[in-house]
Every structure is written in structure tokens, then in C-alpha cells.
């Protein structure tokens, strides 16, 4: 009560708070846009990996990993400081070549060397393509019979021309679980030797077998694949292939299956690779 007996005046102060709608701001949109962009980049990467060949992927990788060109000629000494120290009285200007090559014909020789290498590489590719055509009969002419061709698949890789010789149901390359070659393997070895004689490339022989059941007492996949690769090498040399052209003989057991099912018959195969000439 006031002194005059009247009721006190009640004052109500209303405070309007601002910023209550902060959670409706646009910060989340920026984060969401970044997430969508990252997902788009991820899917583009997955698409590129699936849609490009191994050679194209290597080219893309090389593009993003450029090498630094090194100029062998400098305004000072030949080589790194010309064999002199920067603190000696024999300065680089005194012992240098003045920005000129040591040999006036060095640049021309380098260009000719690069041209020869390019020509040799192109010739090598043409030779491998001709061998592939003879194997597959793409040009209308084939050195392989129709029955033998069913065992052959070819493809060009970065390493060279890969030729797969694989088992067919009822027509294996080797007697089951042994390294004893069948008649079709001996015939294929003869055909491969005749075709390989058309080129000078080195040859790699690699053996693969399908997976064995887990319950077997002794897993012989490694030994069997290596033994079969060695037998194929011997057959090629017996048919006339020069032993010096064999660069590698290896067994991969069941570690690189050609079919999704590791126990599929298709995984029993011999891979012959006509290696590129480096």
C-alpha cells in the first residue's frame, strides 16, 4: 500500500528476445552442400575406375604426378657445379660451357634416340597385335584349329600380350591333380612355339589352379601350379622355342582366380605373356 492508502501500481515489463530462430539459419545448408559435393566426387571416381582400362588409369595417374624436367646444360659448369665448389677460385663461369651442350650433336642424337624408341614401341605393339590376330583369327587367317581355339583367350596388358590357356569341361590341359600334360596341351605348345617364332619378345610362363577343398590333408596348389608352369616351359623348348627367351616361370596357386567361384574349372590355366620390349 502506498502512503496515501491506494493500491500500488504494478508495472509489467515485457522483454522481446531476438535470435530465437538461430536454428533456422543457413549453416547446415553449407555443410550439406559440402557432403553432396564429396559424394558426387566419390561416385565419379568409382565410375572412372570402372569405365577406364588399366592403361588409361595409368595415364590419368601420370597426369597428376608430373615429373620435373632436368636440363643437363646450365650456364655454369658441366654437370653439378662442373666438379667445382662454389667457394673455390675456379668459378663456374670459368669452367662452364656457357649454356652450350658439351657435344654440338648431343641434342640431335637425343632427338633421334627418342624417335627410335617411339618407333620401336609402335613396331612392338603392331607385332603383338598381329600375333593376337593369328591366335583369334580376326584377320581371316589363323594358325590355331577350332578345337584348340576354345582353350585360348587373349588380351593386351601393360606387360604385353597375355594368352590364357584354360581347362574346358571334359578337356583339361593336365591330368586331374597332376602335372602330366594332355594331348591338347602338347598341341597348344606347338602352336604357341610357331607363333612366338614370328616375334623376338621374351616369354613369361605362369601357372594357376583352382582352389582345393579345405578338408584336404595337404594343399598342393602352390606346387601343382609351379610344376605345370615348368612343364609348359619344357614343352615350348622341346617344340623349338629358344630357352633364352623364357624370362619368368612362376606358379600362383589359387591366388588369382579368373572366375568368381574359386573352385571353378576355369581357374585351371596357364598364362603365356609375350613381354613388351622395354
Image (cartoon, helix red, strand yellow):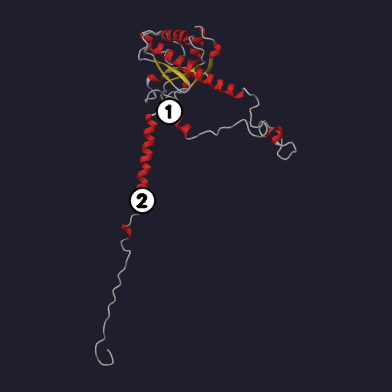
Secondary element at tag 1: helix
User: To which residue does mark 1 refer?
Assistant: 56
Q: Which image quarter: residue 3?
A: bottom left
User: To which residue does mark 2 refer?
Assistant: 30
Gap between marks 2 and 1 measured at Cα: 35 Å
Residue 87's label in the rendered image is none
Residue 137's spot in the image, x, y percent? 37, 11
Position of 108 compared to 42: left or right? Answer: right
Question: Do the residues bearing badges 2 and 1 touch, measured as CB atoms within 8 Å?
Answer: no
Q: Is residue 224 visible?
A: no
Hey, which residue is sitting farthest left in the picture?
6
Q: Residue at x 26, y 84 (%)?
A: 9
Q: Residues within 10 Å of mark 2 (few under 14, many from 20)?
A: few
Hey, which residue is sitting farthest right in the picture?
89
Secondary element at tag 2: helix
Which of marks 1 and 2 precedes in the sequence? 2
Residue 232's spot in the image, x, y percent? 48, 13
Q: Residue at x 33, y 51 (%)?
A: 29
Amino acid at each position: 500500500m502506498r502512503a496515501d492508502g491506494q493500491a500500488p501500481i504494478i508495472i509489467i515489463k515485457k522483454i522481446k528476445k531476438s535470435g530465437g530462430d538461430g536454428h533456422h539459419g543457413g549453416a547446415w545448408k553449407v555443410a550439406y552442400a559440402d557432403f553432396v559435393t564429396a559424394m558426387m566426387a566419390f561416385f565419379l571416381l568409382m565410375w572412372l575406375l570402372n569405365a577406364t582400362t588399366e592403361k588409361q588409369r595409368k595415364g590419368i595417374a601420370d597426369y597428376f604426378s608430373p615429373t620435373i624436367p632436368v636440363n643437363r646444360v646450365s650456364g655454369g659448369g658441366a654437370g653439378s657445379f662442373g666438379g667445382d665448389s662454389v667457394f673455390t677460385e675456379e668459378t663456374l663461369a670459368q669452367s662452364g660451357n656457357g649454356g652450350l651442350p658439351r657435344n654440338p650433336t648431343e641434342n640431335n642424337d637425343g632427338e633421334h634416340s627418342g624417335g627410335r624408341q617411339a618407333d620401336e614401341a609402335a613396331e612392338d605393339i603392331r607385332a603383338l597385335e598381329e600375333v593376337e590376330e593369328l591366335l583369334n583369327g580376326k584377320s581371316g587367317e589363323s594358325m590355331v584349329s577350332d578345337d584348340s581355339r576354345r582353350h585360348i583367350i587373349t588380351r593386351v596388358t601393360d606387360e604385353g600380350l597375355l594368352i590364357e590357356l584354360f581347362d574346358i569341361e571334359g578337356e583339361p590341359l593336365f591330368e586331374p591333380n597332376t602335372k602330366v600334360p594332355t594331348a591338347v596341351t602338347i598341341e597348344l605348345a606347338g602352336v604357341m612355339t610357331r607363333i612366338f617364332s614370328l616375334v623376338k619378345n621374351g616369354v613369361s610362363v605362369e601357372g594357376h589352379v583352382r582352389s582345393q577343398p579345405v578338408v584336404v590333408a595337404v594343399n598342393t596348389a602352390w606346387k601343382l601350379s609351379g610344376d605345370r608352369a615348368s612343364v609348359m616351359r619344357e614343352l615350348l623348348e622341346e617344340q623349338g622355342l629358344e630357352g633364352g627367351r623364357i624370362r619368368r616361370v612362376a606358379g600362383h596357386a589359387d591366388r588369382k582366380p579368373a572366375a568368381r567361384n574359386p573352385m571353378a574349372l576355369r581357374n585351371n590355366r596357364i598364362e603365356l605373356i609375350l613381354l613388351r620390349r622395354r
